[in-house]
């Protein structure tokens, strides 16, 4: 499957991702999911391609952000489908990549 779209979180969203919910402040996981990730993911599924998500150039990913975005997407759409259509890139910190993939495979956070 070919990569046909990319999300660079640092430039397309924020280099300081926030908390889980919009009510908790700016740049929440919920905001990222609803405004950027979900629409691009649904298009990738519909048109059967890979969405590349670049995790670099960000100061850090709070666990609540990861849970509120990638974990919620996994709960709603299923881990297999998410991992089939999303590829991650992190040259700066491969641990980030592992943390997010683990959250997709085993969502642990509070997802409503």
Image: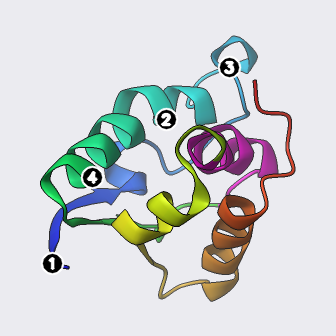
Q: Are marks 1 and 4 in contact (CB under 8 Å)?
A: no
50 versus 77 height, above or below: below
- Report helix, strand or loop for mark 3: loop
Around disc 1, counting alpha carbons within 10 Å, would you say few (fewer than 14), some (14 to 19), or many (20 or more)? few
> Residue 45, which numbered label?
4
In the picture, measured across the screen, residue 71 lies left or right of residue 106, that is: left
Around disc 2, counting alpha carbons within 10 Å, would you say few (fewer than 14), some (14 to 19), or many (20 or more)? many
- The residue that label 2 is drawn on is 33
Q: Give the magenta part as a residue range.
A: 60-74
Q: Which numbered disc, 2 or 4, marks the residue closer to the eye? A: 4
Q: What's the residue at 60%, 42% (across, down)?
A: 69
Residue 70 lies in the magenta-colored region:
yes
Real-space Cα distance between discs 1 and 4? 12 Å
Q: Which numbered disc, 2 or 3, marks the residue closer to the eye? A: 2
Q: Which numbered disc, 4 or 3, marks the residue closer to the eye? A: 4
Real-space Cα distance between discs 1 and 2? 22 Å
Q: Which numbered disc, 1 or 2, marks the residue closer to the eye? A: 1
- The residue that label 3 is drawn on is 25
Real-space Cα distance between discs 4 and 3? 30 Å
Real-space Cα distance between discs 1 and 3? 35 Å
In the picture, measured across the screen, residue 26 lies left or right of residue 35, that is: right
- Disc with the residue nearer the chain's start (1 vs 3): 1
| Residue in front for this viewpoint, 24 or 78 | 78
- The residue that label 1 is drawn on is 2
Q: Which residue is the extreme one toward the top?
A: 23
Q: What's the residue at 85%, 44% (across, down)?
A: 109
The color scheme shown is rainbow
Q: Are marks 2 and 4 in contact (CB under 8 Å)?
A: no
- Disc with the residue nearer the chain's start (2 vs 3): 3
Q: Quadrant of residue 76?
A: top right
On the question of residue 28 being in view, the answer is no
């Amino acid at each position: 499957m070919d990569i046909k779209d990319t999300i660079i979180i640092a430039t397309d969203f924020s280099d300081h991702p926030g908390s889980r919910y919009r009510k908790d402040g700016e740049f929440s996981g919920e905001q990222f999911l609803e405004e950027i990730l979900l629409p691009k993911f649904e298009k990738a599924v519909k048109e059967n391609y890979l969405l590349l998500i670049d995790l670099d150039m960000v100061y850090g990913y709070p666990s609540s952000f990861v849970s509120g975005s990638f974990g919620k997407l996994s709960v709603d759409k299923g881990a297999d489908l998410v991992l089939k259509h999303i590829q991650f890139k992190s040259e700066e910190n491969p641990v980030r990549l592992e943390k997010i993939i683990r959250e997709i495979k085993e969502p642990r956070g509070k997802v409503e």
